[in-house]
Image: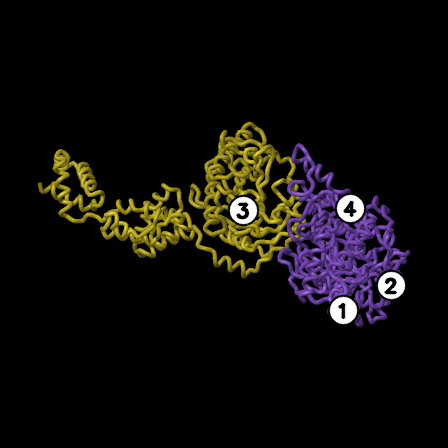
Chain colours: A purple, B yellow
Amino acid sequence: MAFETALELGAALDAGRASAVELADAALARAEAARALGAFVHLQPERAREEARRADARRARGARRSRLDGVPVAIKDLLVQEGEPCGCASRILEGFVAPYQGTQAARLSAAGAVIVGRTNMDEFAMGSSTENSARGPTRNPWDPERVPGGSSGGSAVAVAAGIVPAALGSDTGGSIRQPASLCGVVGLKPTYGRVSRYGLVAFASSLDHVGPLARTAADCAVLLEAIAGHDPADSTSLPEPVPRYTDALSGDVSGLVIGLPRQFSDGAGADPEVLARVRDAVAELERAGAKTRPVELPHAPHAIATYYLIATAEASSNLARYDGVRYGRRAPAASLGEMYRRTRSEGFGPEVKRRILLGTYVLSAGYYDAYYRKAQKVRTLLRRDFEAALAGCDLIVSPTSPEVAFRIGEKTTDPLRMYLSDIYTVSANLTGLPAISVPCGFAHGLPVGFQLMSRALDEATLLRVADAYQRRSDWHERHPELPR
Amino acid sequence: MSAAAPAPGGYEVVIGLEVHVHLRTASKLFSPAPVRYGDEPNHDVHPVDLGLPGVLPVLNRKAVELAVRAALATHCSVHPRSIFARKNYFYPDLPKGYQISQYEEPLATGGWVEVEVEAGSARVGLTRIHIEEDAGKSIHDAAIAGHEGSHVDLNRAGVPLLEIVSEPDLRSPEQAGAYLRTLRQILRYAGVSDADLEKGQFRCDANVSLRRPGAAQLGTRTELKNLNSFRFVEEALRAEIKRQAAILDAGGAVQQATMHYDAARGATRVMRLKENADDYRYFPDPDLVPLELEPESIEAIRRELPELPEAKRMRFQGEYGLSPYTARILAESRELADFFEAVVRAIGADRAKTAANWIQRDVLQALGAGGREIGQTRLAPEALAALIRLVEAGRVTAGSARALLPELMERGGDPERLVGERGLEAVSDAGQLEHAADEVIAAHPDVAAQVRAGEPKGLHFLIGQVMKRTQGKADPKLVREILSRRLRGA
């Protein structure tokens, strides 16, 4: 059952062809078998089996909570689940066990989904390769010498390797979509505010999103239904009711207009093979009845710079709480200042330190106007670009990543090159618009994904088009061999 | 503000005050944890107050309402949109590594407080009022911590605070004290805060500088931090003014610094020089949306504002004919003013002055003895009205009535019944009084002789003796009449 979808597993449970306990055991066994990939930082077999037993009991009573009741899932190591460790792949949170329940875990539980473990990531979600992890890198199941992308690399691999049908990740600049693309799975970043951030350990609050990764758009739809919706504990959470996304999956895309931004048409800096796969995908959607038209996004070239100013500024403040005073790691020291310095010097990895330094600089008196305030202005202009473009089309398409999975270690010494991995994805974070990455073939033997963006709160259209494409393609049905 | 007596050396004193006030809410500014005083350390905390990974702040709407009320009560413009910002710094009692405050776009700006000063009353301008969260408390005292090292108590972390910044309009320590007392009174009246200084609900930082009278530029200022009583503020300012004047007199320059006031020595000393401006790296808090206030909701809060001290004093003078002095005393707290008006309602508006006199003189004296507020006693306004009526009807003497007040405050009850139970009815039986008068005259023939010879002092003594014999229950006027008649007639 390794590569069945969440909906298929739910149906198997409904039909009595499997039990939730069997599914949890199978997922845990496969996680063990795939240990070399480093997808998980923590497995919780006892708790998962107990929850699975309860799910089986509910089904036996005819009281299942949702189609996900009893289906095994994984969550990224920065989503808080009460009573479980939450390490954010950082030394500084070593030994920290969450004493409260996050909204995302609470909603998965309310739907009956069984969380089997926590997935690896770049430390505090800072990275595009899952190499910046205190727990060691995660490997791409299509080629274990290559990265899975990041920062939600563990979640992408847990799904791509058939350990779980679906997982939650977080996306601050592309951290769900880029690893989804590099691992050949679907990854959805919903509209900002659609999924609560309460329980998501913050990297950059105005850019952080929680979303699902799965092998199909339909599974993403069912997961999004479970986790989306207003949360009074998150002031930026949106009050709009959550539609039944699975009802939108009609397979019909006729009449939809797909915008092609010039940046994509030019393809500057992107692998031509990747661009070719994405063009094929657009052509397939045209055959299905969609139309295309060019769109202008004049400020898009500034998106990466804008993103790295805002993201690092917010991160420098968000990560101040890891000070050794209340929880996590504390270095022994003779004075308060020395305790702070040693705790944070030993606890944070180099990329996190780089971003804290950058963000501290960006917010400093005398630089604030030149960097942070200006970046916010550009962000507004970018938002207007996308609003204007989406007034003339329903979706905007691009590659998700300019290239396929790169080799482990290939970019670790060149952070600027690493930052360019996010060139197509950061705009959706800066604008808050929903975006999805869908597998659309292979280049150099490695998966390629294309990205669709839509209007705010129009996840239904994204999912409908992604699902329609998957009905007409079988890329998502190809699976990697587990390494020996 | 009007000029005050010049400082030592003929300098003009310039003072601006920053006041931090705890808002009277049931829960914290951004978490559901309760706001309580005196609980076990770290008892009143929620994951949000601990700054745990993944938590988010949610604004307490009651705190906003109270803050708006404070702003309106001090004539500020309340902005329809204000922004919460993060003030970033590291300290063990600051769990998130930043304090959520307001910076570029505060809740309110540009108000004033009317303050009584030497030359009458004057307006002290308010620069701004903003909402922020309090920090926890660091305990460095090994005796409290139980061992070497420091402890942190986060019960106070996240308690809603109002920061009220005055213009540099104050010209003397006494004016600063008057401003603080007035501001505290307004905030208590408006129900914004209990402003209990001992609980740290009303704290003050003072900025002070000196300059030559008429100078356009302000002198270099120093900041006095965490002054926790009005007396302290005035003392500390006097000490700091003396220190600055001495520096300037000697031809020196005041350095910008944060000062500590050592009450034992009665002097200030430099705690920290401010050579560089602190860089708190303020930026809008992305976890919170802008605070938007509809004009109608601001107006609704304005309509519900209670009558403030100034207006109440004026009304008491106009409506009840009280002197400005009595009106001020009765309007000192909303509680006392309400008590007074309840007594007036019970006894009739025509007796308002009598009621005022009773409260001002006797009730406050009885309260003062126990150091209590009127609401902490069991004296009902109706009971005081009844007591006054008994006195006016001559059924009990003023002295007996006064003696009953402590008991009425302690245990409450009906004055009429108490008077009966205690046998305190006034002795108005002329025969009984005449008999007592005759006995007193007989016992003190020499004094009686003096009075007959036209020495009035002796009459007071004889009245006192008759009162004594009747245990104070006799009407002194009647006693005087009887004594005079009998001494004349004999």
Question: SS for tag 4?
Answer: loop
Q: Nearer the viewer, mark 1 or mark 3?
A: 1
Q: Nearer the viewer, mark 1 or mark 2?
A: 1
Q: Which residue is mark 4?
A: A133
Residue A315, horizontal then vertical, whole percent: 71, 47
Q: Quadrant of the N terminus of chain A?
A: bottom right
Q: Which residue is mark 2?
A: A279
Q: Are marks 1 and 2 on the same chain?
A: yes
Q: Which residue is mark 3?
A: B164
- The answer for how far apart the CA atoms under marks 3 and 4 are is 46 Å
Tell me which amino acid carries mark 1.
Leu
- The answer for how far apart the CA atoms under marks 3 and 2 are is 61 Å
Residue drawn 48% across the image and 44% down it? B196
Residue drawn 77% across the image and 71% down it? A250
Query: Which chain does tag 2 point to?
Result: A
Nearer to the camera, B287 or B179: B287
Tell me which amino acid carries mark 3.
Ile
Q: Which residue is mark 1?
A: A249
- CA neighbours of label 1 inside 10 A, class few (<14), some (14 to 19), many (20+): many
Residue contact between numbered discs 4 and 1, judged by CB atoms under 8 Å: no
Mark 1 or mark 2, earlier in chain: 1
- CA neighbours of label 4 inside 10 A, class few (<14), some (14 to 19), many (20+): many
Mark 4 or mark 2, earlier in chain: 4
